[in-house]
Amino acid sequence: MASVQWHARLRKYGAELQRCRLDAVPVDLGDYHPLKPITVTDSRSRRGGRKGSTSSSSSSSSSVAPDPLSSMLEGTDPLSLFAAASATETPTLSHSSSSVELGRKRRETEEEVGADFEPWSAKRGEILARFTTTEKLSINLFMGSDKSKASSPSSAVSEKVRTRLEELDDLEEGSQRELLNLSQQDYVNRIEELNQSLKEAWASDQKVKALKIVIQCSKLLSDTSVIQFYPSKFVLITDILDTFGRLVYERIWSMCSDPRPLPDSFSVEDVNDTAKETCLNWFFKIASIRELIPRLYVEAAILKCNRFLNKTGIQETLPRLTAMIRGIGDPLVAVYARAYLCRVGMEVAPHLKDSLNKNFFDLLASFRQIHGDTVQNQLVIQRVEIPVYLTLYSPAIHWILQCVAYRAPDVLLTEMMERCKKLGNNALLLNSVMWAFRPEFVAARATDFIGMIKDCDEAGFPKHLLFGSLGRSLACADPPESERLPILNEAWKVITKVRSPQDYINCAEIWVEFTCRHFTKREVNTVLADIIKHMTPDRAFEDAYPQLQSVMKKILMYFHNFSVLFSMEKFLPFLDMFQKDSVRVEVCKSIMEVFIKHQQEPTRDPVILNALLHVCKTMHDSVNALTVEDEKRSLALLINGFIRMVSFGRDFEQQLSFCVEARATFCNLEPVIIQLIHTVNQLAMETRRVMGGSHSRKTAAFVRACAAYSFITIPSLTSIFSRLHLYLLSGQVALANQCLSQADAFLKAAVSVLPEVPRTISVEGKQRSSEAFLLDFINNFLSTLLVVPDHPEQGVLYLVRGLLNMVQDYTWEDNSDAKVRVYISALPLLAAMSQESYLYTIPKVDSNETLYGGDPKFVAEISRLCETLIGQVLDHLKTLGREEGVRRQGSLAFSLFSTLLAHGDLRNNKLNQLAVNLWNLSHKNGQCDTRTSVRTLEHIKQQAQQPDLSHLSDMLLRLSLQSRA
């Protein structure tokens, strides 16, 4: 210990910085620009050159190095190479065959249904959720035997056909069982079982059984005994039909895949005879089904298979199937049969518009059946009212009209509209027209549609539903500007008279978007007032939270100026209707998300601040002991986004008052408190910047108030490292503002908190050692201490000694070198403190360089402290040698060597010898990284060239490089 004498190297920071700067080299850029593309020409000898030649030539049009990605491809896109190779291998098509191919591709493009067509799958879930029942259901479940009737190879074909027909007859003659009193869920489960049975039968090559299941399911579509459930039943049964149709098609298609797969765009000539015979066999089986409805549905399911037989098969079959539907007496069953036929038609032949149109016009011709005696009697028996019954038609009619209207010319749409006008009681059709027709078509004729709505009978189909459908179209397309206000007035006259709160809000929610899109806050405020008036009585709003949330979402979609938004008299009362905690918080979050996204400039508007403080407080108050961390983090991010957007300009006292209020309001969210402390520190620095560094009495008082805010708030944080970092940050801010006593208090508080640091902390839900985080903080703390002047009433270097004493007493992990590494890190600080001029200072703050002025006693005190630290490190190195910690010993020895090299005065023989010993110890047993050692020696060699460091040359001769054992 006594033999170690520390002498800090005298540093001339200005000269060192000058030596480290790169030499400036003039460059003539010419017409070079960094965004200008680089052109590289690279010519090389051809591979097919003279045998044995090894010469190659290379030239470049630019001295710039070629792009490595371009050079990898050698100027050629690999896909282009592949295409070029394919072109050379494939014979060129003649002009006539090319024309045919182009024509075929053009027709295929026209036949395709684009992404703008809403598929049936998108409607399926909505129908199943909407059309439910509590009535008991029945089902005829196929219970036929699984025995197969084997036939010998010598059996005649006619015998096979007769056998299969007998099997079909077996189903129709009673091999089935009726299941009664099923709940809706039981019914759905039974249908799913049938679907699974179909797949299993097909997989086990029991094709006839599969057909029997499909026929049985199709028969269920003629049953309307529980009429409210019929649309959902249709969805479930047609799923089975779709499965069957797909299985049959794939079976026949696979029969044509030998020797090579059949292309998707195959022609009849590509189909072999076996596949054609199998396909005809399926159609013959289906034709033998006696009942109309199963025969119709099953043939429609395999409509696509007509492609295997002839080119015009689908075109000929669709009109026939359309005509067959006329034989269905029940109008509800008939309309869904038309919907299924249109669905299959759109999938396999969307270009055949005539069949689609024919289905629609047939629907119009049979529309009067809905109001006939047969239907009315059925409704009386089932106790179903006519408005409810009419809604059962909506999914089918919507789909038929969607298919007909898809890419249809305006002339056809106008004709369809006029046909609907001529029908009496046409509200149902009118509703579907507005749903299915293009929004642009409806919006351009919105006034005409309103006239048609007025002429409808209210009893059959409520007018508010019609206005709801009109509103959906107007939300997607704009009517003529001159008609917008009259349209809104006419619609709201009807909407506001709706008595049922649920019906009212369903319709009002649709028209809110039209109002927000085309009108000002005055009209929107009127709509909100009307909603509050209808939904407040009997707390009706409690059953309409989804619709009310949709209203809020649409308002926020169009009103991004929050000064305008909160100036609406009815906006906050509307917000108060969200009284369910979870819903209220979600609405508040949506408001804050829009504010953070669209608020471009900081605000001090009292209307905005008061309203958003209320919104953020609502989010904050929802936090409790059960709130998960992700939710807390999400809420804190939104509240912090609000805090960052609050600025009172140069009214710093008002800004501080806001932070005081926010601290009391958001005390349960630690990330928000941390943000507030950062904001106050920024406020203190901003004050200094605005005042130009002047430190008037008023400015000093304000900065001290900011420091007091932080000093009071930091202890409330539970995160130990958040407290440490904020103590250090606040101390640095206080120093920058010449508040020395406050800075001293912050730094002492940080030192006093260090013993509380646990050995492990939670990081992203996992327990990790805190040692690395603690070392990082201590290093930052040490770098700050350079500019902190000693307190006149405390001893020399009292903060440094206090920190080192804490490090000495702290309970470090077993087998840890962290304490010794702190000692090594403290040596550069102490060396810097002994310099005549410090590396960095704070303006108008006298550091120890000024207070002590290079006093020899001060420098001697630093030297004694350094010698103590070095002694502690050396003792630890000896301990590691005994404990076989060779790798750790080598690493620490090299760290201390590097510190002595950079900061010690190696002209001192004992210090010089210590450095050499540390070098040898670090390389003992080959534990030091060779590349690092080589770079270190090169650095020493360069440093030795400086006049004041020439003594390093002698030391360099004694530093040997040892290879690893």
Image (tube, rainbow, N blue to C red):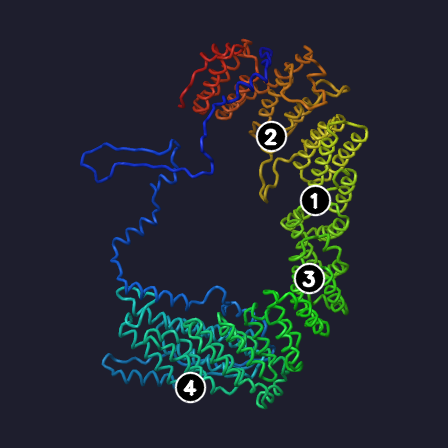
Labels 1 and 3: the sequence-earlier one: 3
- Give the CA distance from mark 1 to mark 3: 27 Å
Q: How many marks?
A: 4
Residue 264 appearing in the image: no
Foreground: disc 4 or disc 3: 3
Asked whether, in this view, residue 898 is left or right of residue 565, the answer is left
Residue 425 is situated, as x and y percent measured from the top left of the image, at: 61, 83
Q: Nearer the viewer, mark 1 or mark 4?
A: 1
Q: Mark 4 vs mark 2: which is more N-terminal?
A: 4
Determine which quarter of the picture holds residue 226: bottom right
CB within 8 Å, label 1 to label 4: no
The mark lying in front, picked from 1 and 3, is: 3
**Which residue is drawn at the image coordinates 41% and 23% (left, top)?**
964
Going from N to C along the chain, the mark reached first, 4 or 3, is: 4
Residue 123 in the image, given as x and y percentages of width and height: 53, 69
Measured Cα–Cα span from mark 3 to mark 2: 61 Å
Q: Relative to 584, is 179 above or below?
A: below
| Mark earlier in primary sequence (1, 2) | 1
| Three-letter code, disc 3 | Phe
Tell which circle, 1 or 4, labels the residue nearer the N-terminal end: 4
**Residue to which mark 3 is pinned:** 519
Q: Which residue is mark 4?
A: 172
Pointer 2 residue = 775
